[in-house]
């Protein structure tokens, strides 16, 4: 049963010492969210000497005319009466409401708004009023989508600093609490319409299920708990398998492709899903892909490197300049100018080595620049006859895509390749016995040239 004491117990299960944290409550004006705000108000009144504070945020979507404005007034009046800081977002023409996918649009809009408030007001947790009936509806929706164990486990009670302390309480218990404590709220009559899948499930399917068993919702809560425990166990096993398959885990996670391929399709999917590769039809392509093939998810680049799968976290990759100006012009009053590349670019693990290139400055077109490889790049490398495509040079050196992405190309103002750092200089521009003005470009290693 929902009582102040049972709510506090749930909150303490989600957050250690909840009185010492700060919160933003998403409040619509309905029974569940107003009850949530009332419970937080009472908890705050009991802990006035603590660091506890909470604000309330409300979105007026302007979708239901006067009803939307009355919802806003209900929440605003509650906050004014109880001296709670109130944040309002009123949807306007600039928000461009779509004709379709209203629910998705509304979700993105409100969570963006919530994050902005949290950042500005330094509020740790976002709190929503999802309850047990919402959990059941989500289970049925995910069941229809073949969502797997993660989807069937439902809405998490604590997920990435989003708290849902009412998840174990039913809609009926929330209404009962509101009545017993004389809490005023607004009914959203649009929930009675079956315009959306969730409303259809709420209004037609759930009541039929409730009729089959007087304890249906309570039994569902127990089943949901078992599913979550099963999910936690499976995830632990998956993590242990991934740890066994991990070849390297410093700058980038590297897994053994051969060993992962020996695992079941379920294990492959669960591991790759963690890196954003959650399309089942994509997984066989990864294991059949040629060497140096790349796949992309929102957060990661996956490179197939012989018997390895390399995962590059895009968010951790440093912003690399597309171009670095090495030298604008040559001062011909000097016989020689020296440039140490260590002053311009970072060393590349596994590739970096000392070298020294001497150019005939009279043959160069300034400014000289450093950039990454482009399609069609070619040079006349020292130690070889004829010219060579840079891409073929990389293949002959057996360089992975990961390595190729890090290598700098030295070019002139005509975009001609003068050298592949740190491998080969273009011999056409090299210093010879007739050179009057020379440009030395080198990479200094351990104080030696």
Image (cartoon, rainbow, N blue to C red):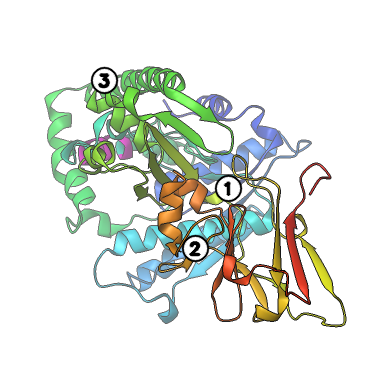
Q: What segment is highlighted magenta in the picture?
A: 134-141
Q: Nearer the viewer, residue 84 or 178?
A: 84
Residue 250 can be seen in this image = yes
Residue 350 sits in quarter? top right
In the picture provided, is 168 more to the left or to the right than 266? Answer: right
Residue 18 sits in quarter? top right
Give the residue displayed 55% in from the left and 61% down from the top: 77
In the picture provided, is 145 more to the left or to the right than 45? Answer: left
- Give the vertical position of 98 relative to 230 (above or below): below
Q: Nearer the viewer, residue 353 or 122?
A: 353
In the picture provided, is 163 more to the left or to the right than 145? Answer: right
**Mark-to-mark CA distance, 3 and 1:** 44 Å
Among numbered discs 1 and 2, the one appearing first in the sequence: 1
**Residue for badge 2:** 373
Give the residue displayed 19% in from the left and 51% down from the top: 197
Crowd rating for badge 1 (residues with CA inside 10 Å; few <14, some 14–19, many 20+): few
């Amino acid at each position: 049963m929902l009582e102040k004491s049972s709510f506090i117990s749930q909150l303490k299960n989600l957050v250690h010492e909840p009185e010492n944290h700060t919160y933003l409550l998403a409040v619509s004006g309905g029974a569940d969210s107003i009850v949530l705000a009332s419970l937080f108000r009472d908890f705050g009144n009991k802990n006035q000497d603590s660091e506890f504070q909470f604000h309330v945020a409300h979105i007026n979507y302007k979708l239901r005319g006067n009803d939307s404005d009355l919802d806003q007034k209900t929440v605003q009046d509650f906050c004014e009466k109880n001296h709670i800081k109130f944040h309002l977002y009123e949807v306007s023409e600039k928000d461009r409401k779509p004709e379709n996918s209203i629910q998705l649009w509304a979700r993105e809009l409100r969570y963006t708004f919530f994050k902005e408030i949290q950042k500005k007001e330094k509020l740790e947790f976002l709190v929503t009023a999802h309850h047990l009936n919402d959990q059941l509806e989500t289970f049925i929706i995910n069941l229809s989508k073949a969502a797997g164990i993660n989807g069937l486990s439902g809405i998490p009670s604590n997920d990435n600093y989003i708290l849902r302390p009412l998840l174990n309480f039913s809609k009926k218990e929330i209404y009962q609490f509101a009545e017993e404590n004389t809490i005023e709220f607004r009914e959203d009559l649009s929930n009675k319409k079956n315009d959306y899948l969730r409303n259809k499930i709420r209004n037609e399917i759930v009541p039929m299920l409730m009729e089959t068993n007087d304890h249906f919702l309570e039994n569902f809560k127990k089943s949901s708990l078992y599913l979550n425990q099963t999910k936690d166990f499976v995830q632990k096993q998956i993590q242990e398998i991934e740890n066994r398959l991990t070849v390297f885990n410093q700058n980038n996670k590297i897994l053994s492709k051969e060993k992962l391929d020996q695992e079941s399709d379920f294990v492959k999917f669960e591991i790759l899903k963690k890196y954003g590769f959650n399309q089942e039809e994509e997984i066989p392509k990864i294991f059949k892909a040629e060497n140096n093939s790349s796949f992309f998810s929102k957060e990661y680049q996956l490179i197939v490197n012989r018997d390895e799968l390399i995962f590059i976290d895009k968010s951790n990759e440093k912003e690399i300049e597309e171009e670095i100006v090495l030298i604008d012009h040559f001062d011909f009053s000097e016989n020689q100018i020296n440039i140490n590349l260590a002053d311009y670019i970072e060393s590349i693990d596994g590739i970096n080595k000392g070298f020294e290139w001497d150019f005939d400055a009279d043959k160069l077109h300034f400014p000289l620049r450093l950039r990454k490889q482009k399609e069609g790049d070619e040079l006349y490398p020292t130690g070889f006859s004829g010219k060579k495509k840079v891409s073929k040079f990389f293949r002959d050196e057996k360089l992975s895509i990961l390595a190729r992405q890090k290598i700098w190309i030295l070019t002139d103002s005509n975009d001609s390749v003068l050298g592949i750092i740190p491998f080969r200089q273009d011999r056409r521009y090299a210093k010879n016995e007739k050179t009057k003005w020379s440009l030395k470009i080198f990479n200094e290693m351990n104080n030696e040239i």
